[in-house]
Amino acid sequence: MGALLMAVPASAQVVQSFQVGVGAFFPRGFDTRADGDTLVADLTDQNPLAFEISDFKSAQWFGEWDVAFGDHVEAGANVGFQTRRVPSLYRDLVDESGLDIEQDLKLRVVPVTAVVRFLPLGRIGSVQPYVGGGVGVLNYRYSEDGQFVDPSDNSIFTDRFTTTGNAPVGLLLGGVRLPIGGDIYGMGVEYRYQWATGDTGGLDNGFLGDKIDLSGGQLNFSFLVRF
């Protein structure tokens, strides 16, 4: 990113902006998740849990500060927040009373990213399409809380397993902006796809997999103010 910004002429006009928005995150599907993913392991264990990867779809809120260099290049810093709780149970097992053995699976992610956008038509005009990419860090927290079955003797116990960490992320993006009443205000629609995988600690932390796949797509809607 730094090399790209240095390539922008010093005489280019610098315009700053701030945008806030909300969107939806769509996790990578079952067949394409990282090797060792703990969600896949939960679904394919000898005593599998009953939930869907798509249950981890979640809303995301974010804010972003951007600096435009001329009419075609823009760099930005973005912070977001998303969380999702997914109820689950053992697919084929019940307790001695015939009741379900239940858990809560919860994933929270705070993405901190830096992006560069290229606007081929510039920032002037009614429609402003763009493409870009970026890098960053995903601060994540994943937990499994509830009742579990010990495979050695099929006994049922209550526990909570938690892992936290920071995973590097790469992303590609594309979108379009529409000015509102001039060049100061605008609204935008953007799609991002990110690639990231975190560590869980595996069996030492109580998880069946040693990874948590954080990859997926995002569809975001934003309101922008330039100054």
Image: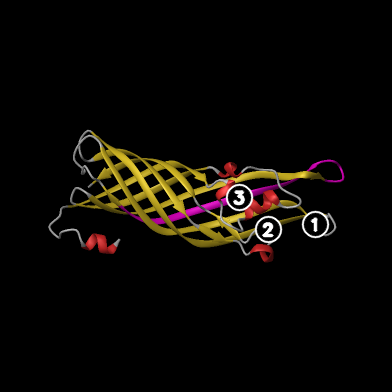
Upstream in sequence: badge 3 or badge 1? 3
**Residue 213 vs residue 187: left or right?**
right
Q: Give the CA distance from mark 2 to mark 3.
A: 15 Å
Q: State the mark number for residue 208.
A: 2
Q: Is residue 111 magenta?
A: yes
Residue to which mark 1 is pinned? 151
Rendered location of residue 191, percent (x, y):
39, 43
Q: How many angstroms separate mark 3 from mark 1 (CA)?
A: 23 Å
Query: Measured from the top left, where is residue 65 in percent x and y?
Result: 31, 52
In the image, residue 149 lies in the stretch drawn in magenta: no
Label 2, residues with CA under 10 Å away: few <14, some 14-19, many ≥20: many
Viewed as shown, does residue 57 lie left or right of 12? right
- Could you say which quadrant of the image residue 76 lies in? bottom left
Instruction: Give the residue displayed 34% in from the left and 42% down from the top.
Output: 175
Residue underneath mark 3: 106
- Residues in magenta, as a range: 95-116
User: Which badge, 2 or 3, comes first in the chain's sequence?
Assistant: 3
Q: Give the residue type that dot 1 points to.
A: Pro
Which element type, helix, strand or loop, lies under badge 1?
loop
Q: Residue at x 36, y 55 (%)?
A: 134
Q: Quadrant of the N terminus?
A: bottom left
* Amino acid at the residue labelled 2: Leu
- Residue located at (28% from left, 38% from top): 186
